[in-house]
Amino acid sequence: MSHKKGPFGLTLSTRELVVQKPHMNYYILFDHIVSIVPCESVRLDRKAMRAARTASGEIAYGSIAAGSAYYAVYAKEVVVHHRGGIHRTGPMEFRLPIYKRLIEELARYGGLTVI
């Protein structure tokens, strides 16, 4: 299952969530997802679309697409594919608009529980 919204896309398989941005993909295994919680949208200008460090030192990526409910996806490890190669990162947080049907399937395949 997948959808594209603005400058990025989301693809869901039975074992991972893939966040697709121009020239870069983030592969998040379900085993590495710590939490997915509703959040406010991220409004960044084009220069700020790059990675930004949070107060705790984690890397956060934002988007500017609108129209869906936003969720903060926190993962303890992410595999990044880009022109320079493939590498693993430490903890990351993504704030993304995710359609309701995709979030329901993500909960089902990922074995996540609602709190």
Image (spheres, grey):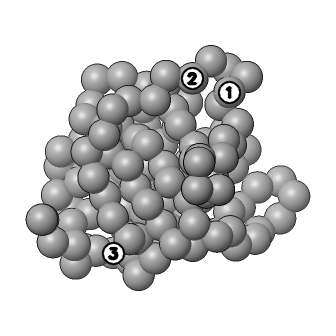
| Nearest-to-viewer mark from 3 and 2 | 2
Q: Do the residues labelled 2 and 1 touch (CB within 8 Å)?
A: yes
Residue 54 in view, yes or no: yes
Would you name the residue on which mark 1 appears? 48
Would you name the residue on which mark 3 appears? 14
Question: 72 above or below 5?
Answer: below
Element under disc 2: loop
Rendering coords of residue 110 (x, y %): 28, 74
Rendering coords of residue 80 (x, y %): 68, 63
Measuring 49% from the left and 59% from the top, which residue is drawn there?
A: 18
Would you name the residue on which mark 2 appears? 44
Rendering coords of residue 102 (x, y %): 25, 52
| Nearest-to-viewer mark from 1 and 3 | 1
Measuring 87% from the left and 58% from the top, which residue is drawn there?
A: 84
Measuring 65% from the left and 31% from the top, which residue is drawn there?
A: 49
Question: 87 above or below 92?
Answer: below
Q: Residue furthest right?
A: 84
Which of these two is toward me, 12 or 38? 38
Element under disc 1: helix
Element under disc 3: loop
Label 1 sits on what residue type? Ala
Q: Distance between the residues labelled 1 and 3?
A: 32 Å
Q: Do the residues labelled 1 and 3 touch (CB within 8 Å)?
A: no
